[in-house]
Amino acid sequence: MSDATLPSATTASPSAATGGSGFSATRLGRRLVPAALALVAPCTLLIVWQVAVQTGMTRLIPSPREVAEEMVDFAVGGIWDDAFSDTLLVHLFASMERVYGGFALAALVAVPLGLMIGRIALVRQVMDPFLQLMRPVPVTAWLPLSMILFGLGARSAFFLVFLGAFYPILLNTVFGVRSVEPRLFEAAEMLGCRGNAQFFRVVLPASLPSIFTGLRLGLGLAWFVIVVGEMTGVPQGLGAVIMDARTLSRTELVICGMIVIGLAGFVSDRIVVTAMNRLLRWSPLHHV
Amino acid sequence: MSRLPIVDVQNVSKVFTVGGGEIAALRDATLTVQKGEFVCLIGASGCGKSTLLRIVAGFERPTSGEALMWNKPIPGPGPDRGMVFQDYGLFPWLTVRENIGFGPASRGRPKAEIRDTAQRFMALVGLTKFADVYPHQLSGGMKQRVAIARVLANDAELVLMDEPFGALDAMTRERLQEDLLELWARTGLTVLFVTHAIEEAIYLADRVVVMEPSPGRIASEHRITLPRPRDVASPEFNEIRRELSARLHSHHAKKAA
């Protein structure tokens, strides 16, 4: 009996000696400490901001409190009752539609194209130089052309988001396909899986981690370019709100728009990461 | 020896072209393996033992000469010749069960049959408890058991092993050697096994083929008749070890002279 209890007693003793606060407190602490640490940077920013406004270092930036008030009005109304009151969800949904639509279309084109570029030499030779040439052109530079091609409005925004998300997905997919371990092809071949069958049984699963990295970066960039995308004269959307608020010199509303985009981007990233962790359970490197 | 050999390698040479230069990896190798035999290829690095194995596997084509299986030229890799790699070559996205079932699944066998086959071969290598575990969660020894089971589950007649236990610790290696011999005795497999460890070769093989480098070639063959299980500490075992060791190092002596 004493033999059996010995190991657990030794492992338990350090925490009991240092903390003395008991079992459940340390377990709770393990959850709370990371959360607290994550809040350090935003809280510091908030304090610096507040101090800067209070000491008059800037006259053009509203205080955190004004932004908070604006945020409440923007979300549920009842304070200013102007054109922007109680419209957060309308704009958020409008932006989400473009972000997810553009992103989905980018994924739908970039993943199969990337698989083909990675796998088929002819496709690579035809497409790769062209795509590399187009890649350095920033999304903002496409804005005028996109307005000519797709007109003022949602279709233009959609196209720009598509462009922003396209390259990270494409490049990571190509990278994933190109970096499958040669050994795995040998293993598949000697087990009787040859030619095109290898595509679904080896290439696709082996490049899935890279494809997911691309999707994650692509979705991030889709949120990143939404403001540019909504410079195209759409009436609704978080980018449109920011542009309108700028012309009206309503900086507190600009900041509200920034915060909502940040949060929405963060939440959608967590969704991708959760899906990724579930699908890539087999990969020791992919638990973020 | 009039029986038809399972493997018949006749005067095979292999030249690799590397950066404009030519390297003779293997020169004029001739080797036959009978069904059910356990043959070890041994030699220092650069002696062409892995090249010879890869030619039999079908991953490489001979530059000249002929490599035959059941008297037919080897056309390329195929499920009748299973390869066990030193670095395992398991599919990281498949569980133990799915890795073992990969061969039958590739050949489009019915689901129930794949499941039964995987079950049987997991039991054979003692991994039933780890059926739904992914390779990165396994130790090196367990990974190599999966690799062996995967080849056997695919009805391979000939198992080609390229320093399969080279990356394992001594204890695990001994355990796997014993298990491999037991499997071999029970299933009537034919094994062609590459190693650079003299003791491993003598412990396992019916016949040890000694190879020498630059250019890689077969130097001599030795039939090991010690009864199994072999005692690595016995005088007879050590006698053979001394002899093979002298053979392996003789070309160094020749060069020095």
Image: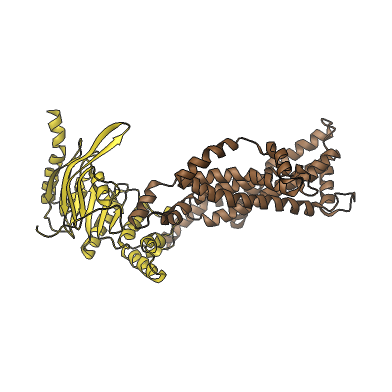
Q: Residue furthest top?
A: B257
Q: What is the tally of numbered marks visible in this picture?
A: 0
| Residue A73 in the figure: left or right of residue B80 | right
Which of the pair A243/A60 is nearer the observer? A243
Which of the pair A195/A260 is nearer the observer? A195
Q: Position of residue A172 (x, y in %)?
A: 53, 44
Q: Can you see residue A18?
A: no
| Residue B183 in the figure: left or right of residue A268 | left
Q: Residue furthest bottom?
A: B112
Q: Residue at x 83, y 42 (%)?
A: A245
| Residue B235 in the figure: left or right of residue A218 | left
- What hue represents chain B? yellow
Q: Position of residue A106 (x, y in %)?
A: 61, 49
Q: Position of residue A123 (x, y in %)?
A: 49, 45
Q: Residue at x 35, y 48 (%)?
A: B87
Q: Residue furthest left?
A: B1
Q: Residue at x 28, y 46 (%)?
A: B60
Which quadrant, please, contains the N terminus of chain A?
A: bottom left
- What hue represents chain A? brown
Which of the pair A83/A2 is nearer the observer? A83
Q: Can you see residue A208?
A: yes
Q: Position of residue B221 (x, y in %)?
A: 13, 47
| Residue A39 in the figure: left or right of residue B183 | right
Q: How is the image coloured?
A: by chain
Which of the pair A73/A126 is nearer the observer? A126
